[in-house]
Amino acid sequence: MDATTELKRTPLYDLHVALGGKMVEFAGYALPVHYPTGILKEHLHTRAAAGLFDVSHMGQRQLVGPDHGSTARALEALTPGDILGLATGRMRYTMLLNDQGGMVDDLMVTRSSDEGQLGLVFNGARKDVDDAYVRAYLPRTVELVARDDRALLALQGPKAAAALARHCPQADALSFMTAAQARFDGIACHISRSGYTGEDGFEISVPAEEAEKVARALLAEPEVLPIGLGARDSLRLEAGLCLYGHDIDETTSPVEANLVWAIGKRRKLDRDFPAAAKIMDQLFDGAARKRVGLRLEGRAPAREGAEIASRDGQIIGRVTSGGFSPSLNAPIAMGYVMPAFAEDGSALDIIVRGKALPAHVAVLPFVPNRYKR
């Protein structure tokens, strides 16, 4: 029996199978790791043209309250982002924090209207944890609503806008981290100019029953190929973006993860978010470790868990994400090191199968972002 038989399925499962997707388990769902095209070609095609990803396993949620102030304040009690200041039609990256300053999850927040609603997108493997965590702290006037009746597609790459505009002309007017209600060939949808590849692109939320129609329409465009989890991971690594459960988790603070930019200026001044004293102390005095990019010499990649050492053999950290970069034709990684070794260009070794491979700290992202500002 197929190992994915008992897993949850997204509304696009049958389409993945029809397209020859190799189905694997991810976040409790059966999702394609690649199609017959292969991971390498899928990755490079997304960088050159446009790739379509099924991200329907993510947790689409709505936070609903009497007005924006009430809803925003409820979310600010759990995050360090400036949600009160989020303008209509804008998005913001933030994280749910626990009392120790660790990240329960990272998420996207969107204010699509002037009403008291915020759109949230949780990581697929964390959405049940997030639901319980958020609901435990909400005031009685604010409700978290699961939108499991919707699918989510990501169209990414330099030709994504041209392909999408043939079906949804409103999309091209959006800039990076903005969103709007729109119509795709007459189908009501919610579109944001965002994604997790470092490329220009969009995320399209549609009713589950319309997902295959939308996906097939996009795949009929000459620029677009279906892309699986394998290339999704290599693309986000090149973009220097964190993967929850690997690069960040409940023990990682925003300062350690080099995500201080996501803490709102007002929130830093007010110090009114979870574990604010600890996080602000780390910001001013330094944390015990820091997330960095790593470039390896040679061709051998370093994988998650590999030890990072100074040139004199001291173990100073571990790799949290690593692989071979198709765009750079070289191995890259991210990991945490002691602050004294976190400067760009610092020479290090990464221990792979007992062998010390020369490496150095590299500027993130590895591949320049191409968002439409």
Image (cartoon, rainbow, N blue to C red):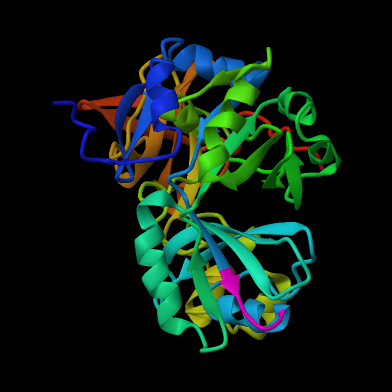
State how many labels appear.
Answer: 0
Q: Is residue 288 above or below residue 200?
A: below
- Residue shown at the point (73%, 24%) measured from the top left: 163
Q: Is residue 6 above or below residue 162?
A: below
Residue 65: within the magenta?
A: yes
| Location of residue 8 in the rendering, given as x and y in whole percent from the top left corner | 31, 43
Residue sticking out furthest to the left: 1
When asked about the image quadrant of residue 371, the answer is: top right
On the question of residue 76 being in view, the answer is yes
- Residue shown at the point (36%, 46%) measured from the top left: 246
Question: 78 left or right of 104?
Answer: right
Dominant SS type (magenta): loop
Q: Is residue 308 above or below residue 221?
A: below
Q: Which residues are magenta?
A: 63-67
Is residue 204 or residue 370 the one in the foreground? 204
| Location of residue 111 in the rendering, given as x and y in whole percent from the top left corner | 71, 64
When asked about the image quadrant of residue 170, the answer is: top right
Q: Is residue 311 above or below residue 192?
A: above
- Residue shown at the point (74%, 73%) measured from the top left: 115
The N terminus lies in quadrant: top left
When asked about the image quadrant of residue 92, the answer is: bottom right
Question: 143 left or right of 204?
Answer: left
Residue 310: within the magenta?
A: no
- Residue shown at the point (42%, 24%) measured from the top left: 16
| Location of residue 279 in the rendering, given as x and y in whole percent from the top left corner | 51, 73
